[in-house]
């Protein structure tokens, strides 16, 4: 899996339809929030701040990687590296 910034994570989750159902949010941190399809983990968040996650769901363009407390991971085999950053391969 790739450790990515929130905008890439959000795009991946949206393009793969993993955000159709709102995931349950636990009230105690830290925890790992997993997005699965057919039993296969597609993405996950190492959640240290529930407030950050909820805020970014509402205002995704406000992401600041220097202030982020959470770690966002995506499955690597659907992505390729371009200029040192993971980009979704749309030819899949």
Image (spheres, helix red, strand yellow):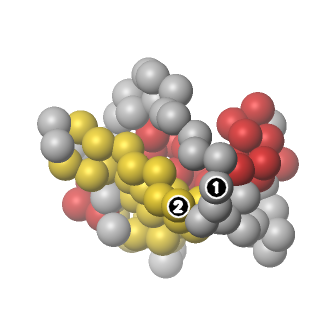
Residue 22 % position (x, y): 52, 27
Residue at x-position 55% and y-position 53%: 8
Q: Which mark is residue 28?
A: 1
Residue 10 % position (x, y): 56, 44
Residue 48 % position (x, y): 66, 64
Single out the mark in the foreground, 2 or 1.
1
Image quarter (top left, top right, bottom left or bottom right) of the N terminus: bottom left
**Element assignment for label 1:** loop
Q: Quadrant of residue 38?
A: top left
Asked whether the beta carbons under mark 2 and mark 1 sit within 8 Å of each other, the answer is yes
Residue at x-position 73% and y-position 40%: 54
Query: In the image shown, does 47 or 57 lie closer to the viewer?
Result: 47
Residue at x-position 45% and y-position 40%: 13
Residue positioned most to the top:
20
- Residue position for label 2: 31
In the displayed structure image, the side of residue 62 where residue 70 appears, left or right:
left
In the displayed structure image, the side of residue 75 where residue 69 appears, left or right:
right
Q: Quadrant of residue 15?
A: top left
Q: Which mark is residue 50?
A: none
Query: Is 65 placed above or below 10 here?
Result: below
- The answer to whether residue 60 shows anywhere in this view is no
Residue positioned most to the front:
28
Residue 62 % position (x, y): 83, 48
**Element assignment for label 2:** strand
């Amino acid at each position: 899996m790739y450790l990515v910034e929130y905008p890439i994570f959000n795009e991946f989750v949206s393009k793969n339809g993993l955000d159709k159902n709102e995931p349950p949010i636990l009230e105690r941190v830290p925890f790992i929030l997993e997005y699965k399809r057919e039993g296969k983990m597609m993405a996950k968040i190492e959640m240290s701040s529930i407030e950050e996650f909820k805020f970014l769901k509402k205002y995704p363009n406000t992401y600041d990687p220097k202030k982020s407390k959470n770690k966002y991971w995506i499955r690597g085999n659907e992505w390729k590296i371009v200029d040192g950053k993971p980009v979704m391969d749309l030819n899949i």
